[in-house]
Image (cartoon, rainbow, N blue to C red):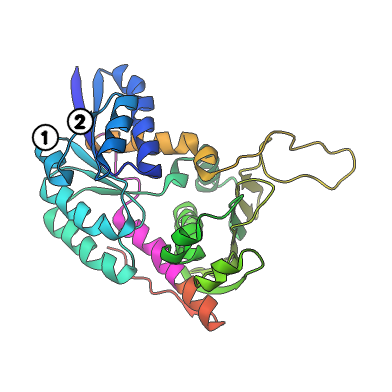
Amino acid sequence: MKTVTLGLVGVGRIGVMHARNIAAIAPQFAGRGIALELRLTDVAEEHARAVAAEVGAEFVPGGVEALLGSGVDALVIATGTQTHPDLIRAGVDAGVPVFCEKPVAGSVADSLPVLEYIAAQGGTVQIGHQRRFDAGYLEAKRRFDAGEIGWIHSLRAMTGDMFPPSVEFIATSGGLFRDCSVHDFDILRWLTGREIVEVYARGSNNGDPAIGEAGDVDTALAVVTFDDGTVGTVSATRYNGAGHDVRLEVQGSKSSVMVGLDDRTALRSAEAGVAFPAGETHKTFAERFDAAYRAELAAFVELVLGERENPCTPEDAVAASRVADAAQESLEAGAPVRVEVPARA
C-alpha cells in the first residue's frame, strides 16, 4: 500500500476541522491502496497533542521546519493569514505540494511576491476556496457549461452568517467583503469563466456598534459587472438569524438554477399552504459546507498524487481578493471602482 503523509501546521478552529476531515477521507483512499498519514504541529503544544490523539495523527514539536524535515509528502496550512506567505515559501522550498487556506496573504500587494516566488520555484499550491467542491455549485457549473442555462443575464449571490464572529476577529479580518464575500467573488469567476471588472458597494451597521467601531459593516451589498457586461449582486450579513444561509441564483436565457435551495435553506415562505423548506437550518459555515471541505482535501490528495490539475490556484485566489479589495474601496468611497484585471497567461 502506497503511503501519503500530510503535514498540517496550525490546529485552531480550521486546523482541527481539516485534521478531522483528513481522518474522514482516509478510508476512501485506503480502498484505492493508498494510506493517508497525518502529522501536525502547533505552538499550542498541549492542544495539538490532544488533537493528534483524537484523529490518530502524530504530533511533531518544533514547528513547520521540523514538520517538513520529518519527510512529509505535502503541507496543509491552517494558520493565521499573516503567516501564510512564509509558510507557503517553506513548503515550496521543501519541494512538496502545499494546501493553504485563503487568502494567500493579507493584501493583494503582499500576495504578488508570493505568486512570483511560487512560479519561479515551480511550486504547486492549492488555495482553499471550498465552494468549488460543493455539489450544488458543481451542478450549476455543469449545467452552464453544458449550455442548459443559456447565456446568463443575472447572478445573485448571498452569504448570511447566523451570528457574527468576535469583534476581535472582525478587527483583523480586513472587512466583510474580504473575509466573507470573497468566496462569492471567487465562485462567480469560477462558474462563469469571466472577470469582474467593476464593483459598486454599499453597507450598513444596525447590529453591534462595536463592529462599526472596528471599522467594518455588518451588512453589505455589491453590484458587480463582468467583462461581457453581465451584472450580478453579492450580499453578505453577520446577522442572518434564521440560520447560516449561502445561495447563488443563476438566471439565463434558457433556464434558471439556485444553489443552496433545499430543505435546510434558512428562509420560510410567506405564501399560504407552502411548507417548503421545512428542515432544520444550518448554523455555521462548517456545517453548511461539511461535505465540500472533505472533497476539497480529497482533491488536494489527488493533486499530490498527480491525478488532477490544481482546482484552485494562487492566481485564482488573488483574483477574487482583487474584487474584494475593490468592493471595500467602493464601500469607503461611495462610488463604483474598477477592478484591475491582469492579462491571463
Q: Is residue 78 left or right of residue 333?
A: left
In the image, 267 versus 260, the foreground residue is 267
Q: Quadrant of the C terminus?
A: bottom left
In the image, 145 versus 105, the foreground residue is 105
Q: Residue at x 45, y 59 (%)?
A: 169
> What whole-number distance in Å separates the C-alpha atoms at marks 1 and 2?
8 Å
Give the total number of marks visible in the rendering.
2
Q: Is residue 314 magenta?
A: yes
Q: Which residues are magenta?
A: 307-325
Q: Is residue 284 magenta?
A: no
Q: Is residue 23 left or right of residue 212?
A: left
Q: Is residue 142 left or right of residue 15?
A: right
Where does the image place residue 236, in percent across and percent down from the top left? 58, 60
Where does the image place residue 85, in percent across and percent down from the top left? 23, 59
Label 2: state its secondary structure. strand
Which mark is drawn over residue 5?
2
The numbered mark, 1 or 2, whose residue comes first in the sequence reads 2
Q: Amino acid at mark 1?
A: Gly
Work out whether residue 146 can be spotted: no
Q: Residue at x 31, y 50 (%)?
A: 79
Where does the image place residue 235, in percent across and percent down from the top left? 60, 61
How crowded pointer 1 is (Cα within 10 Å; few <14, some 14-19, many 20+) is rated as some
Q: Is residue 335 left or right of residue 190?
A: right
Q: Residue at x 19, y 16 (%)?
A: 1
Q: Are marks 1 and 2 in contact (CB under 8 Å)?
A: yes
Which residue sits furthest right?
Answer: 272
Q: Which residue is mark 1?
A: 71
Q: Quadrant of residue 159?
A: bottom right
Q: Residue at x 81, y 36 (%)?
A: 275
Q: Is residue 119 above or below residue 296?
A: below
